[in-house]
Amino acid sequence: MKLGNNISNLKGSPTMGAAENVRKLLAEKQDVVRFDIGEPDFDTPSHISQAGIDAIKNGFTHYTSARGIPELQNALVADLKSKGLEAGKEHLIFYPGSKFSLYSIFSLLLDKGDEVVIQDPLWPTYASIVEYLGGKPVPVNDWNEDNPSSFSVEDYASKITSRTKAVLLNSPCNPTGATVSARDTQKLLDACEERGVPLILDRIYSSLTYDGTADTLPSYDIERGNLIVVSGFSKEFAMTGWRLGYTVASRSFSKLLADYQENTTSCPASFVQKAAAVALSAPRDWQKKMNEEYAARRATMLRGISKIPGWKCAPPAGAFYCFARIDSSDSVAYAKDLLAQKLVSTVAGAYFGRSGESHLRLAFTTSQQRIEEGMERIRSFAED
Ligand code: PLP
């Protein structure tokens, strides 16, 4: 078999890879404290699951349009409106996960050598997708650990060249948890608009902030074409395994995305869409409780980090990760040793871009008790 040239740019996901290593240890019944995986440990709320089960029982198990079923479209249009963005059904496309939304967008945008301006530290999948498609991620090293809320539109705008095909912003950010205010997001969008470059907003963690950053969208006429919103149901609704993401984009770009989708996945699972429509339209008291639990876990983890010699961490403003500075310039080896010696799984900061080295990402997606246990193990590892 002769493989295509692109294969040289294909990388596995380091976060998925870390999870795979841990699964092997768990299969051997090892008592691993898991801080590696970026997924809610909460079950999908039962009213949402029930809607999916009902859909299957009622025979709702056939193809749908890539543009989604009407009740899901309606629910998302209303949700976006409540956050400040007027969009119509014609602006929505649904995918089996927002990872594939991003892959689809970049498949349409990128030619070899094209650039995408992205914050750094960054979620590694952005760089992997862009590079696999022949593009070049251009990092903006904008994270200031001592002042994590600082943000400079100019840092992004100055990286835009004639080869730039998009600027990508993830707020709250995986891995740092940094948030970008509505005002700064709007300013960045204006700067992109002036230069005729689309701003892609990945809002997958937007419902989870600790600093009061509102879950709002820029007020923008989506038909102008320079805003593409990406999000999904994985984190906000504890629905990772259901696989459902979406894009909001201009009518013409959405048409291309729909064509692309029709030739790749066809559509996301039909019954998943039914469940998601209920997720969006039913009351969200449960979500408030889930977010309060994340806030308590965050405090527990930060307290634990403060006791580890040589470690420090800028409190995350959103999402469910602590991106802690460690006392080592080889985070890959550090994470490996920590797992081998103390059975605590983390993800090495080196995987999260140029400014990620000397950090570990720790997800607080496990109980407070397990967080305390894990932090204690790390403390004894650092003191050895
Ligand atoms: N965007 C970011 C920043 C993420 O961290 C993730 C998952 O970890 C995703 C997108 C993809 O989410 P999904 O494909 O489950 O919708």
Image (spheres, rainbow, N blue to C red):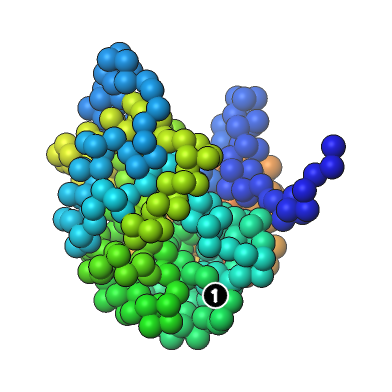
What amino acid is found at the position of numbered circle 1 in the picture? Thr
Residue 135 placed where, x, y %? Answer: 63, 65
Q: Considering only vertical position in the picture, is 84 above or below 369?
A: below
Residue 112 occupies which quadrant of the picture? Answer: bottom right
Residue 237 occupies which quadrant of the picture? Answer: top left
Q: Considering only vertical position in the picture, is 18 above or below 182?
A: above
- For the N terminus, give its image quadrant: top right
Q: Nearer the viewer, residue 15 or 93?
A: 93
Q: Residue at x 14, y 39 (%)?
A: 283
Seen in the image, is 84 located left or right of residue 67? left
Residue 201 placed where, x, y %? Answer: 39, 63
The answer to whether mark 1 is within 8 Å of ligand 1 is no
Is residue 4 shown to the viewer in this render? Answer: yes
Q: Considering only vertical position in the picture, is 175 above or below 164?
A: above
Q: In the rendered image, which residue does mark 1 sit on?
A: 164
Q: Residue at x 56, y 32 (%)?
A: 31
Mark 1 element type: strand
